[in-house]
Image: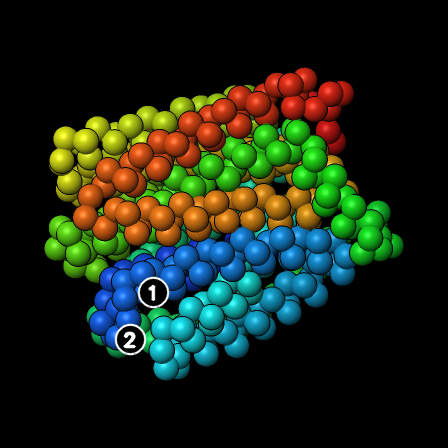
Amino acid sequence: MMQAGSRSFLILLVVLSMLGPLTLNIMSPSIPGLADALGTSKDMAQLTLSSYLFGMALSQLLLGPFADRFGRRPVLLVALGTYVAASCVAAIAPNVEVLVVARTIQSFGATAGLTLGRTIIRDLYDRSTAASMIGYVTMAMMIAPMVAPLIGAKIDVAYGWRAIMAYCAVLGVLSLALASAKLTETRPASLVAATSREVALRTVQLLVNGQYMAFWGASAFCSALFFAFIGTAPYLMIDVLGYSKTAYGYWFMTISVGYMAGNFISGRLSQKLGIDRLIAWGNVAGLAGTIGILIPAMLGILNPLVLFLPAMMISFGNGMVLPNAIAGGLSVDPKAAGAGSGLMGFGQVGVGAVVSFVAAKLGQNSALPLALMMLACAILAYMSGWASRHPELTQKGASRHAP
């Protein structure tokens, strides 16, 4: 097996972390056509995305504490096996209801690499270094969501949407084989003897820790900007503006470029400038991008440029906020890193799932509802980031120098 902390080990974490965002985004170009393909409504078709997001959120609540209790490696292997089985069911789903359930279960397995990957990084590095490493790993991981919509569109056009789920099943088998052969256990010795009650108590303590929840809010509402956009953009591009699924895939790549750029800055500057400053800069970028979508929407202007250029700015801000907010949150109590990572992921995806579903339902013909929801999330993210920089207001006696 690979040595924990080595470069090859980090590459392994990148590969495993790719599975969740790839599986999320690979179906997005097919969603507008699912209603006709399965004889259902657009709302039910949208549930194939929203249910996946809800599954990602719920799974992270379970995966983090389970990893603290039973170890990172066994939890990850079981989750990947679940992913393979659910992908196979999704590929042969006879109706949209079965597909929604399969996608929900699929998300449980797909999320494991993402959640436990950053937990493992926190196992191995201190706070500032962890923020830097999460930034670098996420930057490399973003290759998956960058190309996923384009891959999905190509497969859909050539073979239909079912082939996309079969493709995911193959990726799951390969990921399971790789993790089984190469992944080592990194759970700290202090957690080996922890009981389920102790793990649960540490999780509850995080929920009432003001500084942790400030980092949680910065991460959750920042992510909601992205999820709101991907919930609505396919309909606006394909149904309203008449672009092809493949064209949507190409435009979507601009968002990932912005996110990778933000991750690169985090990787380079987190140790030098500190996580607080980068969270603040990222939130300002998110606000600027949101206003860039809002103003054209209020004027009735709708085209790919007014959607994706501001979205690239938003994703750039996300790339700075998320690695640093996650590292800050996990450093509040390193002994509960698994639970902390899971709660962070639940916030990011859970809030994003709600915002994505509502934005898609309200904004299928206009970008204005989307822009207004994104503005609310951007303001909440900024306020949470501000609170995380003032622990004296969020938690009396909280240390700013957690190990």
Q: Is residue 234 visible?
A: yes
Q: Is residue 230 visible?
A: no
**Which residue is pictured at 55% across the width and 65% down the height?**
109
Q: Nearer the viewer, residue 218 or 270?
A: 218
User: Label 2's element?
Assistant: loop
Residue 243 falls left or right of residue 310: left
Circle 1: is it few (<14), some (14-19), or many (20+) Cα within 10 Å? Answer: some
Residue hosting label 2: 38
Q: Nearer the viewer, residue 45 or 87?
A: 45
Tell me which label, 2 or 1, sits earlier in the chain: 2
Label 1 sits on what residue type? Met
- Quadrant holding the C terminus: top right
Q: CA distance from mark 2 to mark 1?
A: 10 Å
Residue hosting label 1: 44
Residue 291 falls left or right of residue 306: right
95 lies above or below 56: below
